[in-house]
Amino acid sequence: EAGLHCRGVGKRYGGTHALKSVDLDLPPGSVLALVGENGAGKSTLNSIIAGVVRPDDGEMTLDGVPYHPASPSEALHQGVALIHQEIRLLPELTVAENIFLGRLPVASGRIDRARMAREAGVVLDKLGVAVDPQRKVAGLSMAVQQGIEIAKAIIRRPRYVIFDEPTASLGGAEADRILEQVRALRDAGTGIIYVSHRLDEVMKIADRVICLRDGALVAGWERGHFTQQD
Ligand code: ADP
Ligand code: ADP
């Protein structure tokens, strides 16, 4: 079955039951918002899906295939990307170098900078991020840097993307820009998990919302059952 599906996924850290038998369904081309207080288990769940943490229990499938990533690069290889909350770009490298960092085929020998800049430019344009791919990251605004983080995640064309509080360090207009980028990805068929504390954003972007509390799913809403006023 198409989509990302988790059944009975659980995780303990010593005596802490961080995640308790969570079921989750993320169809392609949709946005699932994940909400809950600090310590509810949101990042544990995301880390499991992104291959950062191994679950103790449960099964996952990705587009009908068993999915048990052993590392973030394995997850990415299978089509799942995680966009971290913190910006982790290297300021002394160019925008294009940051986007391609660790992604270039080692065996190919000489790095073709023009090709790298061109491909980075295409993805940045698609995201509406106005920046020269050949300039250094140092000095760029937080909003542009967040856009570059997103470009870095999607250059490999993941079918599923996890956004972990992408607007946490941004102002209102910049946050709206991120929401537009999320919508564009969704409209292109990407399945998206969107973690946020901001209820207004969740209402704008989510097709479904699930709420974690003490490691368990305690509530879920579908769009259409919202009573939102535009
Ligand atoms: P959230 O992202 O919703 O804030 P987390 O997934 O970070 O929640 O945390 C869920 C629970 O698991 C918390 O009680 C937290 O303290 C605990 N926890 C998370 N990561 C670890 C870890 N690496 N070692 C021990 N406990 C952890
Ligand atoms: P693909 O997955 O499309 O076969 P590769 O694995 O060969 O591509 O390369 C991964 C990415 O790096 C692609 O976006 C590709 O265009 C780019 N790339 C490949 N070779 C070079 C090079 N020599 N210099 C710069 N970028 C390259």
Image (tube, rainbow, N blue to C red):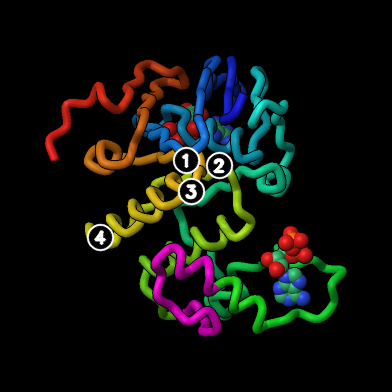
Q: Judging from the image, what secondary structure is the residue with disc 2 in? A: strand
Residue 82 image point, x, y percent: 55, 47
Q: In the rendered view, tell whether residue 101 sits above or below residue 54.
A: below
Q: Is residue 163 magenta?
A: no
Residue 173 image point, x, y percent: 23, 61
Residue 74 has which mark? Answer: none
Task: First in sequence, mark 3 or 4: give its number.
Answer: 4
Query: Around disc 1, counting alpha carbons within 10 Å, would you say few (fewer than 14), some (14 to 19), or many (20 or more)?
Result: many
Q: Nearer the viewer, mark 4 or mark 2?
A: 2
Marks 2,1: beta carbons within 8 A: yes
Task: First in sequence, mark 4 or 2: give its number.
Answer: 2
Q: Residue at x 58, y 24 (%)?
A: 5
Q: Residue at x 82, y 68 (%)?
A: 106
Q: Is residue 168 visible?
A: no
State the residue lying farthest toward the front: 188
Question: Quick one: 146 or 132, which is closer to the camera?
Answer: 132
According to the picture, the residue beneath numbered tag 4 turns out to be 171
Assign the magenta stretch its main secondary structure.
loop
According to the picture, the residue beneath numbered tag 2 turns out to be 160
Q: Quadrant of residue 74?
A: top right
Residue 105 image point, x, y percent: 79, 66
